[in-house]
């Protein structure tokens, strides 16, 4: 994954735990919500593009 091995991931997790401590759960929760919102936005954009393509195809065939 991105050229990062197991030892490096463990080290990064340890550093994050030391830096953020008890704030880490709320930070990760916020990150998860942000990722979910990004996915929702991508899905909406994908749907709009699909509808636009369908409309363009409908007008071309008429």
Image (tube, rainbow, N blue to C red):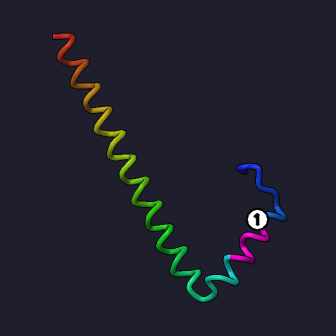
Which of the image's four quarters has the C terminus?
top left
Q: Is residue 49 above or below residue 9?
A: above
Q: Write down the region rendered in magenta.
A: 10-15
Q: Position of residue 13 (x, y in %)?
A: 72, 73
Which residue extends farthest top? Answer: 61
Which residue is drawn at the image coordinates 39% and 60% (left, top)? 37
Q: Is residue 36 above or below residue 51?
A: below
Q: Position of residue 33 (x, y in %)?
A: 44, 67
Which residue extends farthest bottom? Answer: 22
Q: Is residue 36 above or below residue 47?
A: below
Foreground residue, 58 or 10?
A: 10
Secondary structure character of the magenta stretch overall: helix
Foreground residue, 38 or 14?
A: 14
The crowding category of the residue bearing disc 1, from other C-alpha atoms within 10 Å (few below 14, some 14 to 19, many at least 20), is few
Foreground residue, 8 or 58?
A: 8
The answer to whether 57 appears left or right of 9 in the picture is: left
The answer to whether 13 appears left or right of 43 in the picture is: right
Could you say whether the residue bearing mark 1 is in a helix, strand or loop? helix
Which residue extends farthest right? Answer: 7
Does the stretch in magenta take in 13? yes
Which residue is drawn at the image coordinates 29% and 25% (left, top)? 53
The answer to whether 52 appears left or right of 38 in the picture is: left
Which residue is drawn at the image coordinates 17% and 16% (left, top)? 59
In terms of image quadrants, where is residue 52? Answer: top left
- Pointer 1 residue: 9
Q: Is residue 32 above or below residue 26?
A: above
């Amino acid at each position: 994954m991105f050229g990062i091995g197991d030892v490096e991931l463990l080290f990064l997790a340890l550093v994050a735990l030391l830096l953020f401590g008890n704030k880490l759960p709320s930070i990760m929760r916020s990150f998860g919500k942000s990722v979910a919102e990004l996915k929702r936005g991508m899905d909406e954009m994908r749907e709009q593009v699909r509808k636009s393509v369908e409309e363009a195809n409908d007008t071309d065939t008429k």
